[in-house]
Amino acid sequence: MIVVMSRRADEDKINAVLERLKKAGFQIHLSRGVERTIIGAIGDKTRMGDLALEAMPGVENVVPILQPYKLASRAFKEQDTVVKVGDLEIGGKQIHVMAGPCAVESREQLLESAEMVKAAGATLLRGGAFKPRTSPYSFQGLEEKGLQYLAEAREKTGLKIVTEVMDAGTLPLVAEYADILQIGTRNMQNFFLLREVAKVDKPVLLKRGASATIEEWLMAAEYIMAGGNYNVILCERGIRTYETFTRNTLDLSAVPVVKHLSHLPVIVDPSHAIGKWRFVPPMAVAAVAAGADGLLIEVHPNPSEALCDGPQSLTPENFQSLMKDVRAVAEAIGRRL
Ligand code: PEP
Ligand code: MN
């Protein structure tokens, strides 16, 4: 349930409500808006009536949250969440582009990619050091060496780093280097891992599971938030359908739907959704038009030589051209790149 405090409620009144809820065993999450404070309380619904919260001074309203996800819901927090990554704000007016190769392959490949995506206007560098490959015989990533190259690229360019964490065992290592922890599509419902990233003080980029409904995706976000980490960025990356021409099917309607249901920022990854570089730019533009707060785009200095996901990776020239089109659309809808 959420307890909406009146605009005039002072700290003492808020604390009295918090105390009563805590005593009754509710888990508390505070949302302090500009206008008013909202208390999210999660626990045994049947006890709600006994608490007589409506009768307490300073309480304006007590409303149950009907969705199974609570902290991630719009009902809990009306204003859009803006996730801060250093001085970057994801979910604000600016569209952020996270770009780079699928995998960190070598120091040269990564530094070249970083310089190139930065020059084109990206604000974050992506690149996997631990890769979840379908085949155990495919390149699995450079692991810690890859993380070190990412850190060096950040040092050189000022770009923030987003990289995937695959398990709880390597989480401390990845968290040491990453600015944003990426949870990949295959791990979206790895609830144990979600509980672990919830304890880390780093934003989490939560990719939608390839077969996940929007509700399941928001429940995964709920795991991270319930564990105390509110800095969750959702990423639509395509879902599995009967269509085989594209790698997945980009569910663009998820963008306005999730923005309606949740206050969390949403970004779109057309690269993994489509799997063919040619179709990435138009869908990147469409994603921004649909209200996405950012994009995740795979770019490689030489896609034909890439060790991972070459067919969906853009050349530097194609990436520059995508950025030009994205900028135009962003400005047309009152945002900026
Ligand atoms: C990736 O971004 O490198 C990746 C593996 O994506 P996904 O988890 O969406 O397949
Ligand atoms: Mn990839």
Image (spheres, helix red, strand yellow):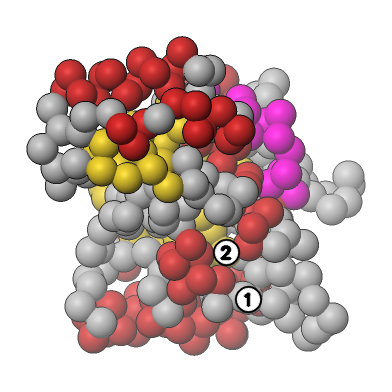
Residues at discs 1 and 2 in contact (Cβ within 8 Å): yes
What residue range appears in magenta? 186-199
Note whether 270 is above or below 175 in the view shown.
below
Note whether 217 is above or below 195 in the view shown.
below
State the separation of the CA atoms marked 1 and 2. 8 Å
- Picture quarter containing residue 54? top left
Q: Amino acid at mark 1?
A: Leu
Note whether 140 is above or below 21 in the view shown.
below
Q: Residues within 10 Å of mark 1 (few under 14, many from 20)?
A: many
- Picture quarter containing residue 174? top right
Q: Residue at x 89, y 47 (%)?
A: 137
Q: What's the mark number on residue 236?
A: 2
Q: Is residue 50 magenta?
A: no
Lower sequence index among marks 1 and 2: 2
Residue 289 drawn at (x, y percent) = 38, 82
Q: Residues within 10 Å of mark 2 (few under 14, many from 20)?
A: many
The one nearer the camera, 286 or 100, is 286
On the question of residue 270 being in view, the answer is yes
Quadrant where the C terminus sits is bottom left
Q: Residue at x 71, y 35 (%)?
A: 191
- The reply, left or right, for residue 186 in relation to residue 121 is right
Q: What's the mark number on residue 250?
A: 1
Determine whether the residue tagged by mark 2 lies in a helix, strand or loop.
strand
Kindly report the secondary structure that dominates the magenta region of the rendered protein: helix
